[in-house]
Image: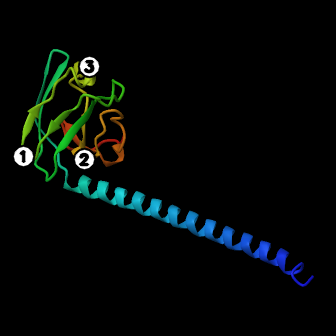
Amino acid sequence: MGLAHLVPLLIVGAMAIAASLFLWRYSETFAEHQKEVRASDISGMVMQQKAALVVEHAYLDGNTLKMFVCNPGDIDLVITAVWVPSFPLVFSPNAQTLRVGQGVWLDPSRYPAMQAADSSDLVEVLALPLPLYDSSEPSRNSQYQVIAYWPSTTRTWEL
């Protein structure tokens, strides 16, 4: 008879303990995820600060833009896109890699905007640190892009 009053209290107590453990585990998982996201963001920002891209030489051959770019930074880059205002921004899934201290002529077949350039266009070359590049989704991590401008290094607008 005395145990009859104790059973409901034990059940409610067990439910409270189970709910507390569930909330604790959920909070722990959420905090771990947030820590990983923050670490990834900081890593991307650090890589962006180590990156540098320079257009060394560029000229128009008919309507096709020919560009030589170099990487004076501290991290390998992937040229993700070449953008001119008269052409939509297209990220290349077959992008060219640019190693530290090296230069490369950009391949117009990989960057369609280079075949539609005009002499009055301000061309933007977008590059992403190599560890952040995903060829299956080339626009991923685009917030960490570095941009080189031709013919001017003066930024006139943002993407």
Residue type for callout 3 = Ala
Label located before the other in sequence (1 or 3): 1
Is 153 above or below relative to 111?
below
Q: Mark 1, mark 2: which one is toward the viewer?
A: 2
Viewer-closest of 109 and 64: 109
Residue type for callout 1 = Gly
Q: Residue furthest top?
A: 62
Total numbered badges shown on the rendered structure: 3
Considering the numbered disc 1 on the image, is that residue within a helix, a strand or a loop?
loop
Q: Mark 3, mark 2: which one is toward the viewer?
A: 2
Is 104 above or below relative to 24?
above
Q: Quadrant of residue 159?
A: top left
Q: Which residue is mark 2?
A: 131
Residue type for callout 2 = Pro
Viewer-closest of 10 and 91: 10
Q: Which residue is rendered at x = 23% and y = 19% of the image?
A: 115
**How far from the left and from the top, in percent, is residue 145?**
29, 45
Viewer-closest of 157 and 103: 103
Label located before the other in sequence (1 or 2): 1
Q: Are marks 3 and 2 in contact (CB under 8 Å)?
A: no
Q: Which residue is rendered at x = 21% and y = 20% of the image?
A: 109
Considering the numbered disc 2 on the image, is that residue within a helix, a strand or a loop?
helix
Q: Quadrant of residue 110?
A: top left
Q: Which residue is mark 1?
A: 101
For the residues marked 1 and 3, what is the alpha-carbon distance in whole angstroms? 29 Å
For the residues marked 1 and 2, what is the alpha-carbon distance in whole angstroms? 17 Å
Q: Quadrant of residue 88?
A: top left
Q: Which residue is mark 3?
A: 116
